[in-house]
Image: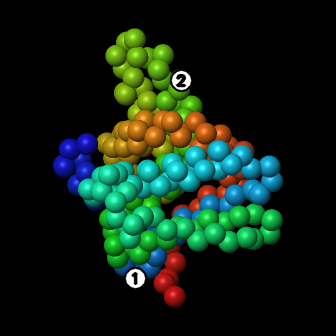
């Protein structure tokens, strides 16, 4: 992704946050993931959180390698037990729009994780025709069109989001399948909300 695409993506994510989630820079963006606690596969559980960490790291301004070396920049999670479920809470201040934008993109990647895994696996049949990346982005774009959070996005904007999600998923393909399997079976609820900071 070149610098102009990154700038367009950042502007788009900022617009979605301010138009759909919160108009105040004093608010926080919260990603809540409710996880079932019965019969967890430790390998799939760790793959899910590795996917979160590495995807978030790849969105860091200076990339994954820089993110990995800066402990203070690592994504933070609070874990809560609630009614027989484990709730993972990720939070970023909207005033730090780059971090809030990364959390929004992470939410989209997690929300469509099973679809991304299926699309990346099935789309390889198009490789012979030289249309692999296009086929993958089109499949994800069709899914994104139905998301209420993205209702104000143009076709070009949806395509940019789809290409970004496919690119991120390809880079984490080793953990993607396990993380998607975990998401299908044990993620009970995934929600992105804004709330006023306490």
Which residue is rendered at x = 48% and y = 23% of the image?
123
Neighbours of disc 1 within 10 Å: few (<14), some (14-19), many (20+): some
Task: Identify the image quadrant of residue 136.
Answer: top left
The label number, if any, that marks residue 26 in the structure image? 1
Q: Residue furthest front?
A: 69
Binning the other alpha carbons within 10 Å of mark 2 as few (below 14), some (14 to 19) or many (20 upward) gives: few
Residue 103 horizontal/vertical position (percent): 44, 61
Name the residue that disc number 2 marks.
Answer: 122
On screen, residue 48 above or below 114:
below
| Residue in view at x 26 percent, y 56 percent | 62
SS at mark 1 in the image: loop
Q: Front-most of 132 and 158?
A: 132
- Up/down of 140 relative to 85, above or below: above
Asked if marks 1 and 2 touch (Cβ < 8 Å), the reply is: no
Residue 88, given in percent of the width and then of the height, sits at 62, 65
- SS assignment at label 2: helix
**The N terminus sits in image quarter:** top left
- What separation in Å lies between label 1 and label 2 (alpha carbons)? 43 Å
């Amino acid at each position: 992704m070149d610098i102009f695409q990154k700038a367009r993506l950042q502007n788009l994510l900022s617009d979605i946050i301010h138009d759909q989630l919160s108009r105040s820079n004093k608010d926080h963006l919260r990603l809540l993931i409710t996880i079932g606690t019965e019969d967890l596969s430790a390998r799939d559980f760790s793959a899910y959180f590795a996917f979160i960490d590495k995807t978030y790291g790849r969105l860091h301004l200076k990339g994954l390698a820089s993110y990995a070396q800066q402990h203070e920049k690592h994504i933070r999670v609070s874990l809560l037990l609630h009614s027989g479920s484990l709730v993972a809470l990720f939070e970023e201040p909207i005033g730090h729009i780059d971090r809030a934008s990364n959390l929004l993109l992470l939410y989209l990647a997690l929300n469509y994780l099973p679809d991304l895994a299926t699309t990346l696996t099935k789309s390889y049949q198009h490789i012979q025709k030289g249309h692999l990346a296009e086929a993958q982005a089109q499949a994800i774009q069709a899914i994104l069109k139905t998301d209420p959070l993205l209702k104000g996005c143009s076709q070009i904007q949806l395509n940019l989001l789809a290409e970004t999600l496919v690119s991120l998923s390809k880079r984490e393909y080793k953990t993607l399948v396990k993380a998607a399997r975990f998401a299908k079976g044990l993620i009970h609820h995934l929600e992105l909300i804004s709330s006023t900071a306490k």
